[in-house]
Image: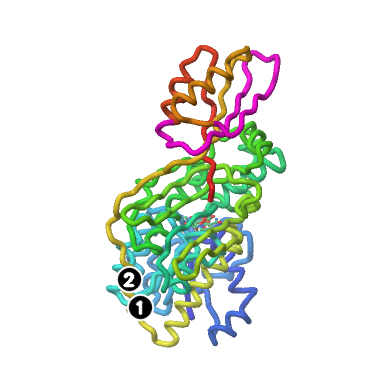
Amino acid sequence: MKIAILGIGNVGTGVYQIVQENSKEIFRYLGSNIDVSKILVRTMNKDRKIPIEDGILTNDFNDILKDEEVKIVVELMGGIDPALEYIKKAISHGKHIVTANKAIMATHGKELEALANENGVFIKYEASVGGGIPIINTLMESLAANKIEEIIGIINGTTNYILTQMTSENLSFEEALKLAQDNGYAEANPTSDIEGEDAAFKISILTSIAYGLNVPANIIYREGITKIQKSDIEYTSELGYKIKLLAVSKKHEDFIEIYVHPALVPNNHPLASINNEFNALFVKGNAVGELLLCGKGAGSLPTGSAVLADILSVAKSIKNDIENNVAVHDIENCIEVKGMGKSQYYVRLQVIDEPGVLGNIAMTFGKYGISLESVVQKGRGEETVPLVFIAHDIEKEMLDKALEEVGGYEYVERVASILKVENV
Ligand code: NAP
Ligand code: HSE
């Protein structure tokens, strides 16, 4: 079974390595070998992390397009241009597609699935969400008879790695990001990871599969982790929480609640112990109940494993003459989309340390109906000190109004941090 890979960076290398090292397992499943006959790269004479067979690298996509023996094109370049154009051309030439590209699947997935159907080829994208975790096939196949009610999880490895390293190794944000990049977890432009865009793409993809609803990533409320300070990590940990970047998608009767944001997770919650590049997803279906899937959410081999699962599935269908007659999954235009509802919040203020300040601020909160679960004042003797609150359930709008008033007091230097407490 001849395949071509577009791109041999972090994920491409993992795929190539698995094909070489696990050939017996592949043969046992498929009854034939997978032969990587061409690999598209940008730079021909670059040092590669693993030895690549002579003569298979090319920097001309047409070499792949024209090769009739290549049945499956595996897109692992990333970005929209020119990856999208190459995928469309490959489909139009009757080639099946496997991709790990969440940016493309979240923004052009519907169009590509329709094009693939028209051309009788498969397009599969398990590796686009959750790295090595088989979440897409679980939703599409294993849970196909369920009404999915909610999906909540940690779906970005880079940010989880950064938050873990800042917490347990006391690294700075920049040091931890550099390590995530060195380990091959981050996107080519890591802004997408740290500003929550990558997670928004992924929750958009999962939402379309789970509920058949099209919620474009650009309308999903998202907040990344760039504003999180080491002091927030320290104080929240004293209060019994871990900070995690969560993606949430809940289907209600006539609206969908969907967002990506850093949140406080109680230490005794399973998501609090998901560390480093690991991802975890809670899925709730009306028949199956709650499921927790967890594993490495980024990195060369775990992601390569998910890509290979798709390659083998398509290869088996080709061998067995099974055509892609699966209906494009039913992505309707979305019903109303809402962000975060009522919740507990963590608030850190930087205030002048003098008598009466805490009392006045608590009174203002009371005026807006906000009751406080815990209050911690840190430091003494400095000009300004941090004042940390955990507020009981409150609408974010009400909290914002209270903080606008509090932020105007002459003894409040600034509202330094507001984080939702996720009672998942
Ligand atoms: P990467 O390390 O940056 O590798 C990209 C590869 O694509 C490189 O080999 C590069 O060639 C090639 N390439 C890029 N633009 C090209 C162009 N215009 N023409 C020809 N070749 C081109 O990326 P990655 O981390 O492997 O990620 C690949 C995809 O997988 C992305 O969509 C990403 O979102 C997704 N993904 C990544 C992970 C992960 O853990 N890294 C996990 C899940 C999904 P050169 O080597 O010659 O520069
Ligand atoms: N950059 C992504 C992450 C790769 O860190 O989760 C896996 O999709």
Foreground pick, 44 / 115: 115
Q: Is residue 42 left or right of residue 350?
A: left
Helix, strand or loop for disc 2: helix
Question: Can the viewer see residue 274?
Answer: yes
Q: Residue at x 45, y 64 (%)?
A: 99
The residue carrying mark 2 is 116
Foreground pick, 28 / 362: 362
Which residues make up the magenta segment? 372-398
Q: Is residue 260 left or right of residue 27?
A: left
Mark 1 vs ligand 1: CB under 8 Å? no
Amino acid type for the residue under numbered disc 2: Ala
- Looking at the rendered structure, which numbered label has been put on residue 324? 1
Residue 234, percent from left and from top: 67, 35
Question: Can the viewer see residue 183?
Answer: no
Q: Using a 10 Å C-alpha cutoff, classify the residue at mark 2 as few (fewer than 14 neighbours), some (14 to 19) or many (20 or more).
A: many
Is 186 situated above or below 413? below
Looking at the magenta stretch, what is its main secondary structure? strand
Q: Is residue 189 magenta?
A: no
